[in-house]
Image (spheres, rainbow, N blue to C red):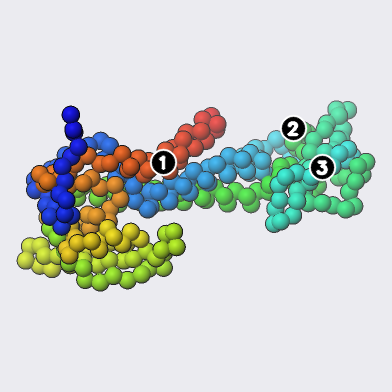
């Protein structure tokens, strides 16, 4: 049995006849909520930021920020091994200096990290700093206990920014969902279009402004898109607006993941190709769960 949703062959003949509140399938709801440039970019920022942080932070001085282990004490030690790591800071390779020293008759071996020091070699005597309550928490004076210094904590800004962008995207997408369910249908005429500074796949992102009539007044609706054909293929484009405040509106075809309008004037089932809008958010959620579990 063919269950495909019938749809108008001519896009300009589409009319949304279904009265509010309109029903949206769960798949449509989720893909629209996750769609949109802000949610997608925020998810990528969160995923990449957490991925990089998961490697960098455990190998940095950041993990010692909330530990005490007493006061710093000094003694002397000896370098027993030097090797180059795969890490670089400011295009300078980082070296691992393994050293040993004695505290209260206890022999301790540890490592410090820093740039190449030509004056240091195996068997060189160095000044060692260690914590009075945990001598194994030690370092060669002037070096780091881990590969990266404390300043590397700035990379935590990336997942934080990602979260803020995601929340902004979800807020905007929730307004889109509200208009799909409750908005009034009309059509608007293109007033102007102009290129913005943004680009996607080397194509300029265009800002389109449409004009429409509501409540005996003239209003404008705007959208930004690099998919010009979506808003240039009809003489008048579909606009959904808030009946109480027409300035709250969307240009229907410019919204990612919107469901088709079938010939009965109702929303049809969104295509399975909209699954692509879930990829970045799922990766972000997965990385967030892994980060939380690893911190427990």
Label 3 CA crowd tier, 10 Å (few <14, some 14–19, many 20+): few
50 left or right of 81 in image:
left
The quarter of the image holding the N terminus is top left
**Marks 2 and 3 close (CB-CB < 8 Å):** no
Residue at image location 29% in from the left, 47% down from the top: 257
Residue at image location 80% in from the left, 35% down from the top: 110
In the image, which is nearer the foreground, mark 2 or mark 3?
3
Residue 292 numbered mark, or none: none
Label 1 CA crowd tier, 10 Å (few <14, some 14–19, many 20+): some
Residue 279 numbered mark, or none: 1
- Which of disc 3 and disc 2 is earlier in sequence? 3
Q: CA distance from mark 1 to mark 2?
A: 46 Å
Up-down relation of residue 282 to residue 240 (above or below): above
Q: CA distance from mark 3 to mark 1?
A: 40 Å
Q: Which residue is mark 3?
A: 83
Residue at image location 82% in from the left, 33% down from the top: 109
- Which of disc 2 and disc 1 is earlier in sequence? 2
Instruction: State the image coordinates of residue 237 (x, y, percent, origin top left).
Output: 19, 60
Secondary element type, mark 3: strand
In the image, which is nearer the foreground, mark 1 or mark 2?
1
Q: Which residue is mark 2?
A: 134
Instruction: State the image coordinates of residue 3 (x, y, percent, origin top left).
Output: 18, 33
Residue at image location 31% in from the left, 62% down from the top: 228
Q: Nearer the viewer, residue 132 or 201?
A: 201
Instruction: Choose top left, top right, bottom left or bottom right for residue 137.
Output: top right
Secondary element type, mark 2: strand
Secondary element type, mark 1: helix
Instruction: State the image coordinates of residue 277 (x, y, percent, origin top left).
Output: 36, 44
In the image, which is nearer the foreground, mark 3 or mark 1?
1
- Which of disc 1 and disc 3 is earlier in sequence? 3
126 left or right of 249 in image:
right
């Amino acid at each position: 049995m063919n269950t495909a949703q019938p749809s108008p062959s001519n896009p300009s003949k589409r009319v949304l006849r279904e009265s509010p509140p309109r029903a949206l399938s769960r798949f449509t709801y989720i893909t629209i909520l996750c769609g949109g440039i802000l949610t997608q970019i925020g998810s990528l920022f969160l995923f990449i930021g957490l991925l990089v942080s998961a490697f960098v932070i455990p190998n940095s001085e950041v993990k010692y920020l909330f530990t005490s282990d007493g006061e710093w004490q000094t003694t002397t030690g000896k370098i027993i091994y030097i090797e180059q790591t795969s890490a670089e800071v400011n295009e300078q390779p980082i070296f691992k200096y393994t050293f040993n020293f004695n505290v209260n008759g206890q022999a301790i071996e540890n490592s410090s990290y820093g740039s190449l020091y030509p004056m240091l070699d195996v068997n060189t005597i160095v000044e060692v700093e260690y914590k009075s309550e945990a001598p194994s928490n030690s370092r060669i004076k002037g070096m780091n206990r881990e590969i990266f210094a404390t300043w590397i904590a700035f990379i935590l800004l990336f997942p934080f920014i990602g979260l803020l962008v995601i929340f902004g995207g979800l807020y905007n997408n929730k307004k889109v969902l509200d208009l799909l369910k409750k908005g009034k249908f009309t059509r608007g005429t293109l007033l102007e279009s102009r290129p913005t500074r943004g680009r996607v796949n080397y194509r300029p992102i265009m800002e389109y402004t449409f004009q429409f009539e509501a409540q005996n007044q003239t209003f404008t609706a705007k959208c930004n898109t690099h998919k010009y054909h979506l808003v240039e293929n009809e003489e008048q484009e579909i606009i959904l607006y808030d009946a109480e405040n027409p300035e709250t509106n969307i240009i229907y075809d410019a919204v990612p993941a919107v469901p088709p309008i079938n010939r009965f004037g109702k929303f049809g089932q969104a295509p399975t190709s909209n699954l692509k809008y879930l990829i970045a958010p799922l990766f972000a959620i997965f990385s967030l769960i892994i980060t939380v579990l690893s911190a427990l």
